[in-house]
Image (cartoon, rainbow, N blue to C red):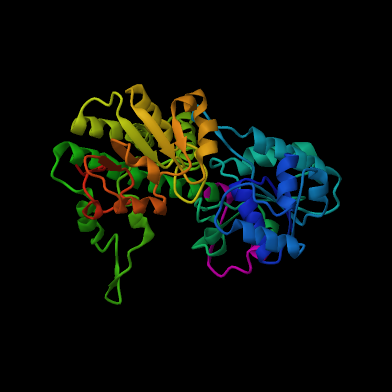
């Protein structure tokens, strides 16, 4: 099929190269000419494992092309996938980009002789596709649903694992407003043999939000319990985790072997969740609930715990060594998670200003996210010492904080850490492997 994708962020670009890998002919549209030119030269504009190879393979096969001309991108389309951003402003989802795109698509449909399905892949609150987006297309085109198709196909891509998640999904959601669009979705994803769930568009939208909310609930719940464990002392939350995770409802025994599902990783305490999805999605769903007269008390609690979690680090360190005045602190990891350069809602954006407010001397490292972090944190970056190589900073540090679980940081176990505090905010290390030093973490002190 000829598929036009509007938007080349994580979702749009990953979707584009993966669909091309299944022999669809993909055109990606972005209004940023610099991004378009880079993509057409085979240069990914985001960091994602495996993306470079897939992009270049698609270009060489003439199955991928980028353009900044929306009309040219739409002319060849059998179907349109919308993957533009839906950011959060003061906890409320901003639909301006997606509605502008919907109007532009409507203008194209107005004069087009083809019946085209518009499939929303951007994350939007339940009830958006079948109301605001449908209305925007209808008003701009002068046509009604049925003259064009409309669907919702939510993404479940984890940054750092997005290619694998797209190519080997556990399920694909087909949200549709008309049977024609359901047929289009089935054709697009016919190469995939996983389970496919067919629902209306607002159910598809709710599946995405519910999925993220339940995962975030686990993270905040285990963090709150871990904070209590830290206060009580004498408790290792990883041992608590081991005991809990053996419950067969969490960890079924299949053929006498524990299945150890990945969902268990969301029960390991840390410094909170970040990224482009969980925080804004929970805020958007909370706002929608409040607008409908529901207080959304659990969502409020999840977000409250998560907002405070990064500050637990300095509190625990101060309880151990006292005032942080002029303490030399090395922060390892600036991205919100490993294998990405994305710093959106990264815990380090709170951890480092908190340390600076206590007059600590902060040195920071990340393999690929330093420049993005400088942009995100603004003028305060001048107070931080950024290093492109972290091992040489160990000897001068009084405290070392691991805030992103980059695998390379495990090498810290090879160094003499005598008289140093090691705060492992991601439970990346085993304290038994450290050479000296005092090991601290969320739920272990």
From the top left corner, tell me how far across and down residue 393 is, in percent.
Answer: 37, 40
Q: Residue at x 63, y 68 (%)?
A: 190
Q: Is residue 261 above or below residue 410?
A: below
Tell me: 250 left or right of 58: left
Is residue 137 visible to the viewer in this orientation of the structure?
A: no
Q: Is residue 195 above or below residue 109?
A: below
Q: Is residue 178 above or below residue 374?
A: below
| Residue stretch rendered in magenta on the structure | 182-203
Quadrant position of residue 318: top left
On-image quarter of the N terminus: bottom right
Count of labels shown? 0
From the top left corner, tell me how far across and down residue 420 is, in percent.
Answer: 25, 40
On-image quarter of the C terminus: top left
Is residue 109 visible to the viewer in this orientation of the structure?
A: yes
* Direction bottom: furthest residue: 255
From the top left corner, tell me how far across and down residue 279 is, in percent.
Answer: 45, 38
Q: Residue at x 75, y 46 (%)?
A: 37
From the top left corner, tell me how far across and down residue 278 is, in percent.
Answer: 45, 42
* Along the line of sight, the residue nearer the viewer: 299 or 73: 73
Say if the magenta span includes residue 245.
no
Say if the magenta span includes residue 190.
yes
Q: Residue at x 24, y 34 (%)?
A: 316
Tell me: 105 left or right of 123: right
């Amino acid at each position: 099929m000829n598929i036009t994708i509007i938007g080349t962020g994580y979702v749009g670009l990953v979707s584009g190269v993966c669909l091309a890998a299944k022999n669809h002919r993909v055109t990606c549209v972005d209004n940023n000419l610099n991004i378009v030119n880079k993509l057409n030269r085979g240069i990914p504009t985001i960091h994602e494992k495996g993306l470079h190879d897939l992009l270049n393979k698609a270009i060489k096969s003439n199955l991928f092309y980028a353009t900044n001309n929306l009309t040219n991108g739409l002319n060849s389309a059998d179907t349109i996938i919308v993957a533009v951003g839906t950011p959060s402003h003061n906890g409320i989802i901003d639909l301006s980009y997606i509605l502008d795109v919907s109007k532009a698509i409507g203008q194209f449909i107005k004069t087009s002789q083809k019946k085209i399905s518009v499939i929303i892949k951007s994350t939007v609150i339940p009830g958006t596709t079948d109301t605001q987006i449908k209305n925007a297309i209808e008003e701009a085109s002068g046509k009604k649903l049925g003259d064009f198709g409309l669907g919702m196909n939510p993404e479940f891509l984890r940054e750092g694992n997005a290619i694998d998640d797209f190519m080997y999904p556990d399920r694909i959601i087909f949200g549709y407003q008309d049977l024609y669009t359901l047929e289009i979705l089935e054709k697009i994803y016919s190469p995939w043999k996983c389970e496919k769930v067919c629902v209306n568009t607002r159910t598809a939208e709710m599946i995405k939000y519910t999925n993220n909310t339940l995962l975030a609930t686990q993270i905040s719940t285990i963090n709150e319990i871990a904070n209590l464990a830290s206060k009580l002392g004498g408790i290792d939350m990883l041992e608590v985790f081991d005991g809990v995770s053996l419950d067969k409802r969490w960890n079924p025994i299949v053929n006498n072997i524990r299945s150890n599902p990945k969902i268990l990783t969301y029960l390991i305490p840390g410094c909170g969740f970040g990224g482009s999805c969980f925080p804004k999605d929970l805020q958007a769903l909370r706002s929608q609930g409040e607008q409908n007269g529901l207080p959304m008390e659990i969502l409020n609690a999840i977000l409250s715990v998560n907002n405070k979690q990064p500050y637990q680090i300095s509190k625990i360190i101060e309880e151990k060594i006292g005032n942080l005045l002029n303490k030399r602190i090395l922060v390892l990891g600036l991205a919100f998670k490993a294998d990405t350069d994305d710093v959106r809602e990264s815990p380090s954006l709170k951890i480092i200003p908190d340390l600076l407010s206590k007059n600590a001397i902060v040195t920071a490292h990340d393999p690929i996210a330093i420049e993005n972090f400088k942009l995100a944190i603004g003028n305060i970056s001048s107070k931080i010492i950024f290093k492109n190589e972290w091992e040489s900073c160990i000897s001068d540090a009084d405290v070392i904080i691991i805030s992103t679980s980059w695998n390379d940081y495990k090498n810290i176990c090879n160094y003499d850490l005598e008289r140093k505090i090691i705060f492992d905010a991601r439970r990346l290390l085993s304290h038994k492997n450290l050479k000296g030093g005092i090991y601290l973490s969320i739920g272990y002190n």
